[in-house]
Image (cartoon, coloured by chain):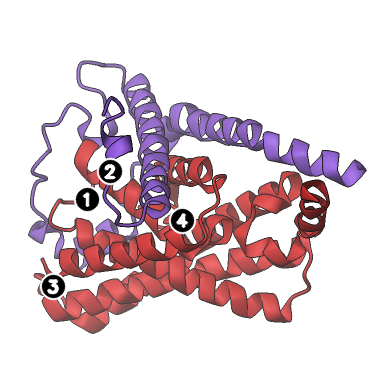
Chain colours: A red, B purple
Amino acid sequence: MAGAVVAAGLVGVSVKKAAQDLDDREIPLAGLVAAYIFALQMLNFPVASGTSGHLLGGCLAAVLVGPWVGSLCMAVVFLVQALVFADGGLTALGLNIIVMGYVTCFVGYGVFLLLRRVLPATRAGLTTSAAVAAWFGVIASSLVFVLYYAVGGAGDASVATVATAMVGVHALVGIGEAVLTGLTVGAVLAVRPDLVFGAQDLRPVLAMREPLVTAEAA
Amino acid sequence: MGAATRTMSRGRTIGLFVGLGLAVALVLAFFVSPLASSQPDGLEKVSIDKGFDDTAKDHALADAPLADYGVEGVDNARLSTGLAGIIGVALCFAVGAVVLLGIRTLRSRPWSPPTPAAASPSG
């Protein structure tokens, strides 16, 4: 239940931050990101020995629409999954929003920003940054789950065993996450780089827009 | 001039981009998701191996018409999963857009009660 309270607080902060510089285009884009991540989360891919993995998507959402709007998209996906598809318990909804949504969003976006400083500001550089960052986001998410298990988990397995198993499996799941994130970011950068939040500095067309508008008004 | 036209046309094609993106999501949800692996996912596998999967309880809504990504009454497993995927994609798009629309609406009228003129146009 504490998870629900923390999640509600985080969503509140996201709403406030998202409102600060909301541009009309972000309304359909946020819907699209939520819809796309929902679809990708359905695609379980086999990883190893009878295990599958699926995209979490927070890093992808954060690179495309920014971490604040992105975290709201993630919350929407978990809400729909829990309420309509009975996937993810109602009491675990808050925890899912934190562990799979906020952690992948913000750890992923943080690593993305760090990598962008060292990698060239090109399409390849950005795509690589997003893909690698997505891997770290999934690992961080599995570690936060272990933390939760250590504090309030109901199982008998030792924390160390769970930690090794979770991180081991998710190092593989993270590869799938990295591939899907890289493919998507690369594709959007190819057709509409102006719609990628994490590529704002690469928008020559938008930079030219303001003087044109001023000229029209005068 | 060239740049201006380009900026304007870029502004218009957001609809096309969103439409194409949704089409990709729908195709993935309808055609690809029934082929997805049904093996336990990362967390489920660890919980089974380490013996804490039995701590999971049945979902309160386990009998809902779309529970577990199937449409109640559709017996073809592929079709059932595919349709559930389409419904989920559409719902996520709608809820996501409505949430952001709500945020924008709240922001454009920050905490001020509606003016009498707006509340009752007749008066």
Residues packed near mark 2 inside 10 Å, few (<14), some (14 to 19) or many (20 plus): many
Q: Earlier in the sequence, mark 1 or mark 4?
A: 4
Reading the image, the residue beneath label 4 is A57
Reading the image, the residue beneath label 3 is A153
Point out residue A45 in the picture as x, y percentages from the top left corner.
45, 47
Q: Are marks 1 and 2 in contact (CB under 8 Å)?
A: yes
Secondary structure under tag 4 reads loop
The mark found on residue A88 in the picture is 1
Point out residue A25 in the picture as x, y percentages from the top left corner.
57, 45
Instruction: Check disc 3 and give the amino acid type.
Output: Gly
Q: Quadrant of the C terminus of chain B?
A: top left
| Front residue (pair A29, A113) | A29
Reading the image, the residue beneath label 2 is A81
Q: Earlier in the sequence, mark 2 or mark 4?
A: 4
Q: Earlier in the sequence, mark 4 or mark 3?
A: 4
Pinpoint the chain carrying mark 4. Answer: A
| Front residue (pair B82, A189) | A189
Reply above or below: A139 against B37.
Answer: below
Determine the CA span between mark 2 and mark 4: 14 Å
Residues packed near mark 3 inside 10 Å, few (<14), some (14 to 19) or many (20 plus): some
